[in-house]
Image (cartoon, rainbow, N blue to C red):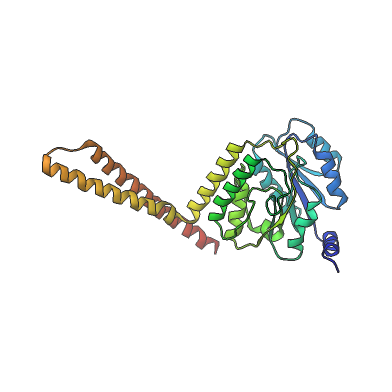
Amino acid sequence: MSTLYCILLLSKIMKIIVGMPAFNEEKNIAPLILKIQEFGYKVLVCDDASTDSTTLIAKKLGATVIQHSKNIGYGATIQSLFSKAKELNADVLVTIDADGQHDFRDIKKILVPIMEQKANLVIGSRFLEKKSDIPKYRELGIKALTKITNTAQETSISDSQSGFRAYDKTTLNQINPTEEGMGISTEILLKASDAKLKIFEVPIIVSYEGDTSTHNATSHGLSVLSTTIKIISIKHPMSFYGIPGLLFFALGLIFTVLTLSTFSETRTIVTNQALLAIGSIVVGLVLIMTSVILTSVISVIRERKN
């Protein structure tokens, strides 16, 4: 029995929902919904307060629509899709952009590792097979963000920012995304890695004809970077805050000794040295106390969960 036949058979039994974050996509959303429905999948659209006919079109075509009363951000739409998929008792949630950049035919490909029980979370990667006509500046930015993400997780991947993904029921139940911005893609990966979920990648093709992305590259990068730093600081507070705190404290002691030594010889206080001594010691103590408090709080939370 071929893998493709097995996928088609299982897709008839399992509840597979294809979720689309959308903002002002009236020009692109209709053909995408129709093509996905031809596969027999339920379509779920999260409209992030569009000012065009996105919601009206999606509803007329039979999609389930979640409407945000105000524009919150990409991360908020993913949160809504996760929440609704769990409410609908989905076996698999596939997320795909509503702008038409993703090839809907890759949905079957992205489902295979889950159907074969090789993965809990599958990422459609633009870099496993170089077929996507991705702009060079964007490719460099995504690869840089992916390297940062890989430093904070056990699984090494090639495309941490791909929005074309599949999540099985285990992932939907265990991961609770909270980021409202573009950092949510990284947040989910880091939380999945921390939960020891199996992450898999498959090659996909993405079309950048017309460069339809509505996300600002700089704000995207900053969002991902801040999310990564925040999660690392929470996971490893002693390393993130404690070690720099000890270094600042030690530096402060060195400047204190230099200040006292100069004073004993000349009976004068070098202001710059004294300020550096006081400042370094204060910063060091604040960082050390932060690491201790965060470690204690996290330990209590983990004990309560267990």
Taking the view exactly as shown, the residue that stands out farthest to the top is 51
Rendered view: 254 above or below 195: above
Residues 100 and 83: in front is 100
Q: Residue at x 60, y 63 (%)?
A: 196
Q: Is residue 139 left or right of residue 148?
A: right
Rendered view: 152 above or below 259: below
Res. 221 image quadrant: top right
Does the rendering let one see residue 263?
yes
Residues 190 and 137: in front is 137
Q: Position of residue 107 (x, y in %)?
A: 78, 53
Q: Residue at x 11, y 40 (%)?
A: 266
Q: Residue at x 23, y 46 (%)?
A: 256
Residues 178 and 244: in front is 244
Q: Position of residue 273 (x, y in %)?
A: 24, 40
Q: Position of residue 77 (x, y in %)?
A: 68, 43
Q: How many marks?
A: 0
Does the rendering let one see residue 90?
no
Q: Is residue 264 left or right of residue 281?
A: left
Res. 4 image quadrant: bottom right
Image quarter where the C terminus lies is bottom right
Q: Position of residue 48 (x, y in %)?
A: 70, 37
Image quarter where the N terminus lies is bottom right
Taking the view exactly as shown, the residue that stands out farthest to the bottom is 1
